[in-house]
DNA sequence: CATAGAGGTTTATTGCAATAAACCATGGGG
DNA sequence: CCCCATGGTTTATTGCAATAAACCTCTATG
């Protein structure tokens, strides 16, 4: 694992891998053909590029992610907050919740998470 | 205003406009030259493209945004939630807050926002 | 009345992510 | 023993965002 910035195509690809891993590489080319319309060489190119970046590995024709979905989610959420909200969670929530209603369930779930994150 | 999907360069550009608007176009080329390293034709190309998309307007050499920063913030946050968090705010927060600590102040501010968004 | 700067447009060029074509090696089954 | 599927690599090609060069008109002004 290193730099977690993923391009769109890379993200879609990883999404499939997270769902199927560990997955045989030939099987993966077939799934990508079906779900993304990719030719097999495209899939292998992706495998190699992401392997070089230590984002996944391909051993004995078995592809496995080296980064967890949660790591990428964390990276992407922080990246968005930095880019567009000056890193501020309240600012983000204010924009996101604008005119939105939360269910009691969701609200409680969130309240609990905020509590847990408070020293 | 129409499609709010902005490319990176477009976003940086709009960021400058939100800060300065209403801003004279020649002045804008100078600021972009300084802050983004853009030649003046690059800035005018951007102005035209974003005008066509009704994201800003240029009238009598005065450039003004037609979309508010908050609209784009909302769009971008929803786009990310859809792409990477199954649209779920709790999932997003769980990833973002992972191993993070919030100050009491921030926590209270957020709790209040959640309350307000709860029917 | 030329000329410099403001305020553009038209038309490339560049750069890089995305995608693929073409080729290669190996091992197991008819 | 040959041929076909598996499991790749090497080397383009494509597509489009990003950037810019070159050119144009108008107006104030020395």
Image (cartoon, coloured by chain):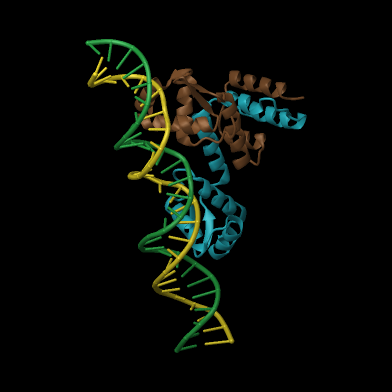
Chain colours: A brown, B cyan, C green, D yellow
Residue B70 or residue B35, whichever sits in front: B35
The quadrant of the rendering that contains the C terminus of chain B is top right
At 63% from the left and 19% from the top, the residue drawn is: A109
At 58% from the left and 24% from the top, the residue drawn is: A70
Question: Percent x, y for residue B91?
Answer: 58, 23
Q: Quadrant of residue B101?
A: top right
Q: Is residue D15 above or below residue A54?
A: below
Number of marks in picture: 0
The reply to whether residue A37 is in sight is no
The reply to whether residue A46 is in sight is yes
Question: Percent x, y for residue A52?
Answer: 52, 32
Question: Percent x, y for residue A23?
Answer: 45, 18
Q: Is residue A57 above or below residue B77?
A: above
Q: Is residue B72 above or below residue A111?
A: below
Q: Quadrant of residue B102?
A: top right
Question: Percent x, y for residue B95?
Answer: 61, 26
Residue B76 or residue A36, whichever sits in front: A36
């Amino acid at each position: 694992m290193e730099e977690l910035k993923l391009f769109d195509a890379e993200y879609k690809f990883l999404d499939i891998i997270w769902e199927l891993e560990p997955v045989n590489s030939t099987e993966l080319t077939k799934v990508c053909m079906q779900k993304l319309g990719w030719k097999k060489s495209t899939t292998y190119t992706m495998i190699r590029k992401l392997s070089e970046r230590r984002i996944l590995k391909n051993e004995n024709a078995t592809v496995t992610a080296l980064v967890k979905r949660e790591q990428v989610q964390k990276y992407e959420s922080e990246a968005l907050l930095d880019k567009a909200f000056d890193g501020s969670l309240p600012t983000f929530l204010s924009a996101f919740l604008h005119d939105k209603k939360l269910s009691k369930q969701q609200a409680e779930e969130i309240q609990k998470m905020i509590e847990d994150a408070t020293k």
